Amino acid sequence: MNFARGAVVRVFPSDQILMTSTDKLGRNYSGQGNLLALTATMTYVNEGDVGHNAIIRRENIQFALPDRQVEHQWYQFVSSDIEDDKLSVKRVSEARPFPVNAGSAISHETLFTAWEIDCQSGQKSCNPAGNFVLWNDFVQVLKKSRNIAFKTSSDIYSGSPVSATCEVRVRDWEIPILENEQWLVAVCHESTLGGQTRKLSQRGLPK
């Protein structure tokens, strides 16, 4: 007997991550500090049978700082490029739900930004501004650790979330670029452990 397979959506680890500042992007609110902003290439495939399409509800990116976990939510779909040795990030559209049709793949670049944490649960340790990271603080973390893992996750309408993790390895000569230019397009390597790809879907960030 043949049984039709429903939507089976997978997200690939991002090939590259753009790390930049809100000042560099010109997207700061008046009186706001110079904050970290990230873009990532989000690529999906739907291995389901014909007619079993899926809807991506939202996207986010997560990473760990020495003192906390940070999550940024999707903000815009963008197109980034280097024009005359300068960073160019152009808005394509507002971030919004989109389909991944059965038997097809789709890719786009997403700009992620910080949102306040809902602290109504009453946890004393909850910090509403915990997801906001000052650019200079982020650079200091990279100067000490050099490596940082990014987990990109997507909620699927009427389905289970999907995620993938990659790791940026910052080289010594790239630190002055981060400090002076306030941006870096970095290759994001698929996370490995013991020579094998480490699958982190729905299991949180690496320790």
Image: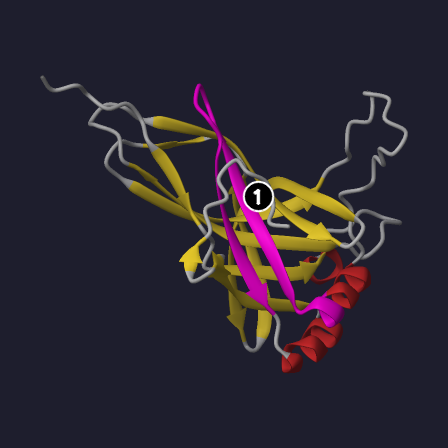
Pointer 1 residue: 76
Q: Please, is residue 195 above or below residue 64 in the view?
A: below
Q: In this view, does 78 lie to the left or right of 28?
A: left
Residue 147 belongs to magenta span? yes
Local crowd size for mark 1, using a 10 Å CA cut-off: few (<14), some (14–19), many (≥20): some
Name the colouring of the figure: secondary structure
The quarter of the displayed image where residue 25 is located: bottom right
Q: Residue at x 55, y 67 (%)?
A: 186
The quarter of the displayed image where residue 124 is located: top right
Q: Where is residue 135 in the image (x, y as percent from the top left)?
A: 77, 60
Majority secondary structure of the magenta segment?
A: strand
Residue 167 belongs to magenta span? yes
Residue found at the far front of this picture: 194
Residue at disc 1, secondary structure: strand
- Which of the image's four quarters has the N terminus? top left
Q: Which residue is drawn at 76% across and 64% down?
A: 141
Q: Where is residue 157 in the image (x, y as percent from the top left)?
A: 46, 22
Region rendered in magenta: 142-169
Q: Position of residue 163 (x, y in %)?
A: 49, 40
